[in-house]
Image (tube, helix red, strand yellow):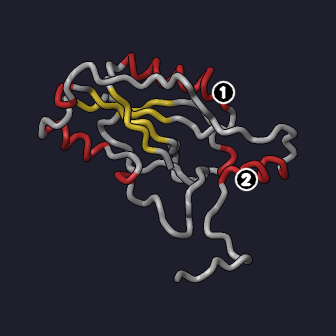
């Protein structure tokens, strides 16, 4: 027989409840609603993966200099930058991830440009897009669906991307 669950300890984290409580504490009057899409635009690849051009989308941001910006001063705008040469680092401290249990010192863990270049050289993918793309973490579903997603799609189409790999922090 298993041990009974102690009533003073939760066995899970209710992210929906936590998010609603957080936004209520911030003064928002409408409860947080999780994004839900009946008609997600996912489609099968039109060509074999070994012939497809792959793009990478990250939620990290470009760092222009050696100074670390204040987390809330980083612009939340869609961007693109060359994959060759790959960036030496990106700014991640403004993103939500467990900063106690892990780190973002390994750029390849959230922007695997070198691994995708290796996959292209081995013929596992057709090619890597000439640019990688950045999408800000935005708490506005309207801004995401009406501004950011269409801009990412435009950039990917401009570069002939067949499939995009989203590596979010």
Q: Which mark is residue 39?
A: none
The residue under the point 46% across, 58% down is 104
| On screen, residue 33 above or below 6 | above
The residue under the point 73% across, 53% down is 17
In this picture, residue 88 sits left or right of residue 63: left
Query: Which of the pair 144/103 is nearer the observer?
Result: 144
Q: Position of residue 43 (x, y in %)?
A: 37, 23
Q: Which residue is mark 2?
A: 17
Quarter occupied by residue 163 = top left
Query: Which of the pair 11/26 is nearer the observer?
Result: 11
Quarter occupied by residue 80 = top left
Q: Which residue is mark 1?
A: 143
Q: Residue furthest front?
A: 1
The 10 Å Cα crowd at callout 2, few under 14, some 14 to 19, many 20 or more, is few
Query: Which of the pair 60/30 is nearer the observer?
Result: 30
The residue under the point 33% across, 36% down is 83
The 10 Å Cα crowd at callout 1, few under 14, some 14 to 19, many 20 or more, is few
In this picture, residue 165 sits left or right of residue 66: left
């Amino acid at each position: 027989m298993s041990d009974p669950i102690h009533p003073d300890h939760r066995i899970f984290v209710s992210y929906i409840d936590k998010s609603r409580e957080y936004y209520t504490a911030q003064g928002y009057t409408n409860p947080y609603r999780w994004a839900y899409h009946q008609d997600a635009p996912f489609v099968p690849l039109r060509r074999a993966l070994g012939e497809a051009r792959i793009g990478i989308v990250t939620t990290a941001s470009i760092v222009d200099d050696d100074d670390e910006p204040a987390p809330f001063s980083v612009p939340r705008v869609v961007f693109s930058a060359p994959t060759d040469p790959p960036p030496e680092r990106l700014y991640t401290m403004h993103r939500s991830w467990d900063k106690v249990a892990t780190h973002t010192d390994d750029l390849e863990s959230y922007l695997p440009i070198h691994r995708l270049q290796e996959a292209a050289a081995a013929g596992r993918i057709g090619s890597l897009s000439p640019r990688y793309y950045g999408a800000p973490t935005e708490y506005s579903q309207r801004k995401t669906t009406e501004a950011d997603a269409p801009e990412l799609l435009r950039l990917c189409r401009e570069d002939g991307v067949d499939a995009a790999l989203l590596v979010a922090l």
